[in-house]
Image (spheres, rainbow, N blue to C red):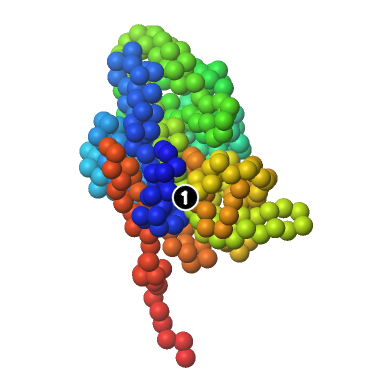
Amino acid sequence: MNNQLLTSLSEKYGSPLYVYDSEKIISQYNRITNAFSTVENLKLNYAVKANSNISILKLFKKLSSGIDTVSIQEVQLGLEAGFEPENIIFTPNGVSLQEIEQVANLGVQINIDNISILEQFGQHYPNIPVCIRINPHIMAGGNHKISVGHIDSKFGISIHQVPHIKRVVKNTKMKVNGIHMHTGSDILDIDVFLAATEILFKTANEFKDLEFIDFGSGFKVPYKEGDISTNIEELGKKLSKRFKQFCKEYGKELTLMFEPGKFLVSEAGYFLAHVNVVKHTTSTVFASIDSGFNHLIRPMMYDAYHHIHNISNPQGRERYYSVVGYICETDTFGSNRRISEIREGDILCFNNAGAYCFSMASNYNSRYRPAEVLVYKGKDYLIRKEETFDDLLKNQVIIDID
Ligand SMILES: Cc1ncc(COP(=O)(O)O)c(C=O)c1O
């Protein structure tokens, strides 16, 4: 998206602001479907947690995507966006049986990731088929906080417990229609991913009523120039071939599923903020913006890198800056960044702001969450208003303190 358009959107809708480019979302979606075009039954379920704006969900619906959800509220947002329950999969972790029952009763595909709930669900609802989340014990993912398939992880049922799963299934007469894994985000090495899929195939052979195998997600996107990303085309070629071979062995055309979040929306998003203050200290130059980790927490939460550029002065001389937020504790978006000269009032643009940015935003420091804009077919649409003081008060019950 060009600087001129981003600047005009910032002026039109105020600051700070999230902007999403639907063309990028569509092209990323098409990249995956093209990479797996030889697979007969392919189903992508967009991971709602990455960005749960209803207009974004509607865009995915238009692309014939399903959705992957982790809370009943995400399921409800999906239904609100018009998804049929059969196009929603529920992959929670550590939620109550009650929540799982509620979602199952909506007709949504359940994915269970612990034996305790599997047993209880099977006893009560032997007729509702479930998918099982397997932990393949593979260390994949960009860093420890987003690697979820390793042995110490709380996610999934260990592959070593497959005999136990089978016993529960046999005793309760429940049906397992899917096998799932999600090893973690930011997977760099396709071979590690493929090694995990072999474990999943082996496990799949233990269940005779499967309809699908869900390989989760974790595809990495580039954050800076020269950055490597998951080679989806190569993965498509290798995994499609192996999947088709597996289906032959299994004796049934299964559906191949993925549930990408970041790969589909990360690069489509831009976060725009104004520079309030340029402060020269004895050791560095700070550019303080009209936002903080309340709006974009990824750098502070897991050292995520967001490329930052000055769209108000793109030709200016490059200098080194620490870009910081206004939250009253350490609040750093990037240290020692080479950015074209920053003046107070300039607009800074953060790339890769489409995934896990707004959806992780909060009201910390009693700030409003910002507006969101979607550019669709060349037109800009406000898809969420900036909050107001009423939003901060909305659920507060104000009592008299004498
Ligand atoms: C179960 C599950 N599926 C899919 C995703 C989406 O991962 P990504 O955004 O890396 O594609 C996540 C992310 O945390 C997840 O936990």
Residue 127 visible in the picture = no
- When the figure is inspected, residue 39 is found, relative to residue 287, above or below; the finding is above
Q: Nearer the viewer, residue 80 or 126?
A: 80
Whether residue 284 sits left or right of residue 360 in the image: it is: right
Residue 344, given in percent of the width and then of the height, sits at 56, 58
- Relative to 347, say whether 126 is above or below: above
Which residue of the protein is positioned furthest toward the bottom in this rendering?
A: 402
Give the x, y percent position of residue 83: 24, 39
Residue, disc 1: 272
Seen at 45% across and 21% down, the residue is: 232
Mark 1, residues whose alpha carbon is within 10 Å: few (<14), some, or many (≥20)? many
136 relative position to 239: left or right: right
Against 305, is 42 above or below? above
Q: Amino acid at mark 1?
A: Leu
Determine the quadrant in which ligand 1 lies. top left
Going 37% across and 11% down the picture, which residue do you hit? 244
**Percent of width and height locating residue 177:** 33, 27
Q: Position of residue 25 (x, y in %)?
A: 37, 34
Q: Residue at x 37, y 39 (%)?
A: 21
